[in-house]
Image (cartoon, helix red, strand yellow):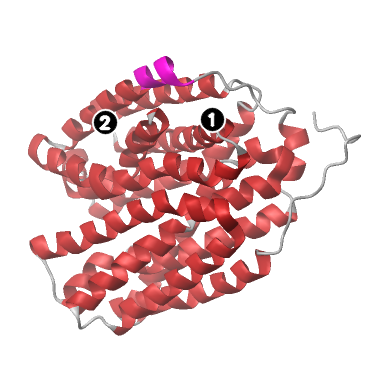
Amino acid sequence: MTLFVGMFVLGSSELLVVGVLNVIAADLRVSIPEAGGLVSALALGLAIGGPLLTALTIRLDRRTVLIGALVLFTAATLVAVWTSSYGLFVVVRVVTGALQGLFIAAGFAVGTSVVPPERMGRAISAVFGGITISAALGVPLGTLVGQQLGWRGSFVALAVLSVVALVATVAVVPSVPSAAGGFASQARYAFAPRVLAVLLLDFVLFTGVFTALTYLTPFLESVVGVTGAVLSAFLLAYGVATAVGSVGGGRFADRNASVTVIVATVGTTAALLALYLVGASAFAVVVALVGLGLFAMGGVPSLQHRTISLAGPGAALAQPLPASAANLGIAVGAFAGGVAIDRVDVSAAVLTGVGIAVVAIVLAIATSRLAPREVPVAEPVA
C-alpha cells in the first residue's frame, strides 16, 4: 500500500501540468505550446534520467533509494512552487521525471522481493496501479484544486502528499539489499537482445496508443460531438478502465505473461479500430474507450514481468526500462498523431495509431517465445 501511495503521488505529478497548462502559461508568461514543453521535459527525464539514476544507485539498499527519491522529489516540487522562471521549471520537471523513474525501479524491486516468484505479476500491478489511479482520480482532483487555488496550490498539495508517502515509506518499507553485481555485470543481461526486443514492443505499442490518445479530446469534440461534462465522463470512463486493467492485469501476467501480452496487444488494436469506425455513436465510443483502457494498461504488468524475467541477473538495472520505452513511445506517438492531423484530420490520428498497433501485434507474437538466458553456476554475476 505504501508503494502504491508513492506511485500515486509521482504519477499525479506527471500529468497534473496538463490540467492546469493554461494557468501555468499565463502565470509564467509563456505560450501554451511552450508550457506544453513541461510535459515533454518530464517524459524525457523519466525515459533517460530514470535508468541513469538506477545505474548510479544500483549498489544501494532499495529502501534507501525510495526514501532519497521522495525527499528530492518533495524538494523539487517546492522549487517549482516558488519559481517564476520557466527555464528553471523545465529543469525541475526533468529532475522530477528522473526521480520518478528511479522510484518506479526501486518500487518494483521492493514489491517483487516480498512475494514468491509466482505472484510477481500481481506485485507489479499493485505497485503500478498507483500511477494509473492517479491518472483516473489524482489528476482530475489536482486540476480542480489548481483551477480554484492556482497551479501553485495544486503543487503544494502534491508536496504534502509526497511527505505523507515519505513518512509511510520510512515507517513501513523493509530493507531490501541491492542485487548482486554492479552496473557492468548487470548491463550485459539488462540490455541483452531478448530484453531490447520486448522493450521495442513496449515502445511501438505505446506509440500506437498515444498517436490516438493524445488527441482524444478533439476527436470526441469534433467527431463524436460531445463537450463539457459529457466529455469529462468519457475521459473518466477511460481512466477508470486503465486503473482496472493495470491492477487486474497482474493475475494474467502470473499465469502466462507472453500470452497476455499478445492478447493485450490484439485487444488494444481492436479497440483503436473500433474507435475509428464507430465515431458517430457515442455509446459505442465509450465501449471502445473502456476496451482501450482495459487492454492497453492490462498488458503493462506482463510487459514489466517479461522484461524482468528475460533480464535475469540484470533485473535490477532493467526495472525502469519498460517505463522509459513507454514514455518514448508516448512522445513519438504525440508527434505522429500531430502529423496525421495536420495532413488529414483528427480521425487520421486514430487510424495511424491502428496501423502502428498492428506492428506491435507482430512484435508481440515474435517475442512470445523468447526465454531468459541460462546462467551457468560457474559464471560470475558479481
In magenta, the rendered stretch is 166-173
Q: Secondary structure at mark 1?
A: helix
Q: Amino acid at mark 1?
A: Val
Q: Is residue 98 visible?
A: yes
Q: Position of residue 18 (x, y in %)?
A: 26, 49
Q: CA distance from mark 1 to mark 2?
A: 23 Å
Q: Within the image, what quadrant is residue 94 found in?
A: top left
Which mark lies nearer to you, 1 or 2?
A: 1
What residue lies at 69% left-to-right and 45% top-to-bottom?
Answer: 311
Residue found at the very far right of the displayed protein: 378
x then y, percent, for residue 252: 51, 56
Residue 356, compared with residue 368, is above or below; it is below
- Of mark 1 and mark 2, the one earlier in the sequence is 1
Q: Residue furthest top?
A: 171
**Does residue 326 appear in this view?**
no
Q: Residue at x 20, y 40 (%)?
A: 142
Query: Pointer 2: what residue?
Result: 158
Any mark on residue 250, and which?
none
Magenta-colored segment: predominant secondary structure: helix
User: Which amino acid, by three-letter code, is at mark 2?
Assistant: Leu
Question: Mark 1 and 2 residues: CB-CB less than 8 Å, in contact?
Answer: no
Whether 22 is among the magenta residues is no
Tally of marks: 2
Residue 291 x/y as whole percent: 35, 68
Task: Count neighbours of disc 2 (C-alpha within 10 A) and say few if under 14, some if 14 to 19, many if 20 or more.
Answer: many
Location of residue 20 in the rendering, given as x and y in whole percent from the top left corner: 20, 45
Q: Residue at x 72, y 43 (%)?
A: 312
Q: Secondary structure at mark 2?
A: helix
Q: Of residues 77 and 58, which is closer to you in this image?
A: 58
The residue located at (22%, 57%) in the rendering is 236
Question: Residue beneath label 1, please?
Answer: 110
